[in-house]
Amino acid sequence: MGNNNLGMKISQEGVNVKEAEPHELLFSSKYNVLKVAFEGLITNVVTTAPLTVTEEFTHDLGYVPMFQYRVIVPASLSGYSEKVAYDQMLDDGLIQVRPYADTTKFYVDCNYAQNETWEHYYVIYYDRIV
């Protein structure tokens, strides 16, 4: 005898977790979720802008992983906030970034237009989204 209702569930606010349909759950241990393989912070101190740099990190996962990436804009640049670039080119006039990955490495192409200290945060996930 088995109980298919064992596990952990979190339902949306106002929904009884014991009666929730799958689409009403915020989390269920029944379903696979992304797992963090690697995360890191890249810091570049730019003193001779314009400057072009390619950063790389070896992940050796054997497949192109899903990742998240964001640029933390320096506090000295008032009027700007954190910029997010998931899998696309970001170009706002002060910085151009293009994050991408292959089966062994994660890369970020950076073109800096201003002398600042730039921080780049990335998360690489184990599971592939199919």
Image: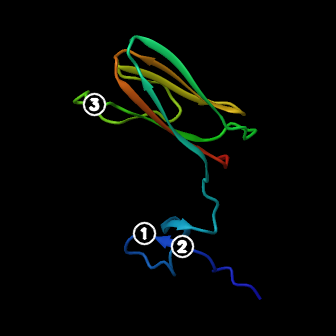
Q: Is residue 81 left or right of residue 18?
A: left
- Please tell me the numbered disc located at residue 77: none
Residue underneath mark 3: 80
Check disc 2: other Cα within 10 Å, few if <14, some if 14-19, many if 20+: some
The outermost residue toward the left is 78
Disc number lying in front (2 or 3):
3
Q: CA distance from mark 2 to mark 3?
A: 38 Å
Q: Amino acid at mark 1?
A: Gln
Splitting the image into 4 quarters, where does residue 80 fall?
Answer: top left
Disc number lying in front (3 or 1):
3
Q: Quadrant of the N terminus?
A: bottom right
- Please tell me the numbered disc located at residue 12: 1
Query: Residue 128, percent across and down?
Result: 67, 46
Disc with the residue nearer the chain's start (3 vs 1): 1
- Please tell me the numbered disc located at residue 9: 2
The local secondary structure at tag 3 comes to loop
Q: Amino acid at mark 3?
A: Tyr
Query: Residue 74, percent across and down?
Result: 32, 30
Residue 5 against residue 22 in the figure, above or below: below
Q: Amino acid at mark 2?
A: Lys
Q: Nearer the viewer, residue 15 or 42?
A: 42
Residue at coordinates 52% horizontally, 65% vertically from top-left?
23
Residue 78 against residue 35 in the figure, above or below: above
Q: Is residue 59 left or right of residue 24?
A: right
